Amino acid sequence: MTGKHTVAEKLPNDADAVLAQVGGTPLVRLRTITKGLASAVYVKLESENPGGSIKDRTALSMVRAAERSGALQPGATIVESTSGNTGIGLALIGALTGHPVVVVTGDSISAEKLAALHRYGARVVITDWDAPSGSPENARAVAARITAETPGAWRPLQFDNPANPQAHYDTTAPEIWEQTGGAVTHFVAGVGTGGTISGTGRYLKEKSAGHVEVIGADPFGSVYSGGHAGQILVDGVGNTWPEADWPKAFNRSTVDRFLRIPNDEVYTTAHRLLNDEGLSLGPSSGLAVAAALRVALAAPHGSVVVAIAPDAGSNYLSKAFNPVWLAENHIRVAPDVAEELAEPSTGRRT
Ligand code: PMP
């Protein structure tokens, strides 16, 4: 022992050092489930963010903007209604920057996400996620009530907050542009608040003079792709609200087209990503990659398709990777489902 300080005491203990790790995620090329395709499919691994999802970027961007505007004062409470990942990002940032965090969420939240919220010290309020907007049980109504009752409290309102898409315009998209050397031709993402696809899509279109095609991957039960509102079985994506209530974070004109992907194909793709590519990713990643494979199949040879993988499979061990949950929800995971669904096309080499 040379000094009187322990090694741990000498290490930097700086919240900014952790927050600096938000973003800068890897882009990896799929090798196995793309076999035979004449185009490349890349996945942006957002699970590599410190809080485990793409929503760290959004949470940090919204908190920073509110600090700048004065809407969020030091030590004030942050209250948000969220299906999970934004809450985890906010809880992480709150723990590092001294803001108590209250997360209002639905009872379908996975046990793993709930544990993460508790781990970062958030107060979690469970509501009926499907309660209509007029109901006092509605998650947004509950969040509004808690905010009103908590002096100084601030609500990020991710669905309507311009700092949400801006996070992706400022960070996610430039990373993709740089990591592909400007060669990206198609961008595929699931749409929840719409922040990811709107911010990233706008930047990529600007940079490529409109050449990058932006494709929304939508689950069954979502109205974004023109379907009827119904039960959505893919966490964090899709929307059942009438168009007048769509989030302001979502810029519909950035999306060239939507692909609606059946649940069997979503979950089969998530399982194949794990088994064949060694990538443990969540169901919304399965959704985006399933759509990206369809896009790559039909795209001109040599296209470069980039899909967003918002979070990791470890968030869904009790759901997506649990045979009982899959059976209860009538989801059939078959290794060959994706291939069965793929239509023959000139895009696949024979
Ligand atoms: N996947 C997961 C798992 C999510 O939590 C979210 C955020 N709701 C999304 C995808 C969609 O991202 P966005 O809100 O930016 O559209």
Image (cartoon, rainbow, N blue to C red):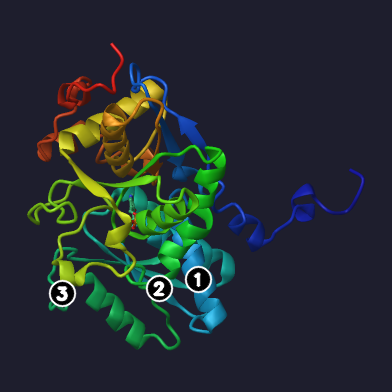
Image quarter of residue 316: top left
- Precedes in sequence: disc 3 or disc 2: 3
Q: Is residue 47 visible?
A: yes
Give the image quadrant in which the ligand numbered 1 is located: bottom left
Q: Which amino acid, mark 2?
A: Pro
Q: SS class of the residue under badge 3?
A: loop
- Precedes in sequence: disc 3 or disc 1: 1
Location of mark 2 (residue): 156
Query: Cβ(mark 1) to ligand 1 < 8 Å?
Result: no
What is the x, y in percent for residue 48? 50, 43
Pick whichever, 212 or 340, lies toward us. Answer: 212
Tell whether label 1 touches label 2 (CB within 8 Å): yes
Q: Is residue 311 left or right of residue 4?
A: left
Q: Is residue 60 above or below residue 322?
A: below
Task: Specify few, some or many for label 2: CA neighbours under 10 Å numbering under 14, 14-19, or 20 or more.
Answer: many
Alpha-carbon distance for marks 3 and 2?
18 Å
Location of mark 1 (residue): 63
What is the x, y in percent for residue 154? 42, 80
